[in-house]
Amino acid sequence: MLYGPLGNGFHIPAEVSRLALIAAGQTAARLLPLATGPRAPDATALFTDAPLPPLPASLEAYPLEDLGEALAWADYLAIDSPMGKLPEIMEKLRDHSDGVHSGRGQILIETDMPCAGLAECGVCAVQTSRASRARQSRQTGQAWSLVCREGPVFELSKLMV
C-alpha cells in the first residue's frame, strides 16, 4: 500500500518580506522550496549547521550560532527540527527573541511515525497549547497533539515545549 503526503505543510503569509529558514536537523533540503518561486519573500536567509546542498544565489547561509541575528532581522521563521531537538530550539528562541516574534513562524517537526500516520500509537505526541484538535491528559491537564495527524508543521505559537 502506498500513502501520499500526510499532514499540514508550511503556509507562509503573503505579507512576509524577511524569512529566516532554520534547519536544526541533518538537512536543510525540506526548507529550500520556501526560498524560491513566485511566492518567495523578498529576502530569505538560511541558518543551519547541516551540510549545504546547492543553494540559489539569492539565499545567504549562516551557522546556527548566528540565530540571534536571525531573530532580530526576520519577520517570520520557518524551522525544521527533529523532535529530540525541540526543547533546545524553543529555548534558543525564547533566549534570543525578547518577544520580537511572539510565535510568528512555523515549525516542521521530524519524528518517527510507527503507526504510518494513523494516529494510533502516540509516539509522535508533542505538547501544545489547548487547541480544538489537541488531546488533553486527564492526569496533568496538558494538551498534546500528534505530529502524524495535526502536523508535521505547527504554528510556533501553539507549542508549549
Image (tube, grey):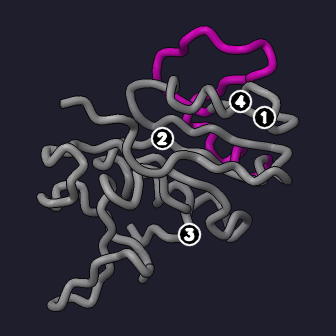
Instruction: Indicate the position of residue 105 as horizontal and vertical percent values.
Output: 63, 56
Q: Which residues are magenta?
A: 47-73
Magenta includes 63? yes
Residue 131 point in image, percent of width and height: 44, 79
Q: Secondary structure at mark 2?
A: strand
Q: Secondary structure at mark 1?
A: loop
* Direction from residue 154 to residue 100 in the image, left or right: right
* Residues at marks 2 and 3, CA–CA distance in whole angstroms: 15 Å
The kind of secondary structure element at disc 4 is: helix
Disc 3 is placed on an element classified as helix
Q: Nearer the viewer, mark 2 or mark 1?
A: 1
| 125 falls in the magenta region | no
Q: Which picture quadrant has residue 151?
A: bottom left
Q: Residue at x 51, y 55 (%)?
A: 92
Mark toward the start of the polypeptide (1 vs 4): 4
Q: Mark 3 to mark 1: distance in Å?
A: 22 Å
Q: CA distance from mark 3 to mark 4?
A: 22 Å
Amino acid on which disc 1 is placed? Ala
How far apart in space, not on screen, are marks 2 and 1 (Cα)?
17 Å
Residue 35 is labelled as 4
Query: Quick one: quadrant of the N terminus?
Result: top left
Q: Earlier in the sequence, mark 2 or mark 3?
A: 2
Residue ID at (64%, 50%): 11
Q: Which residue has dot 3 on it? A: 157
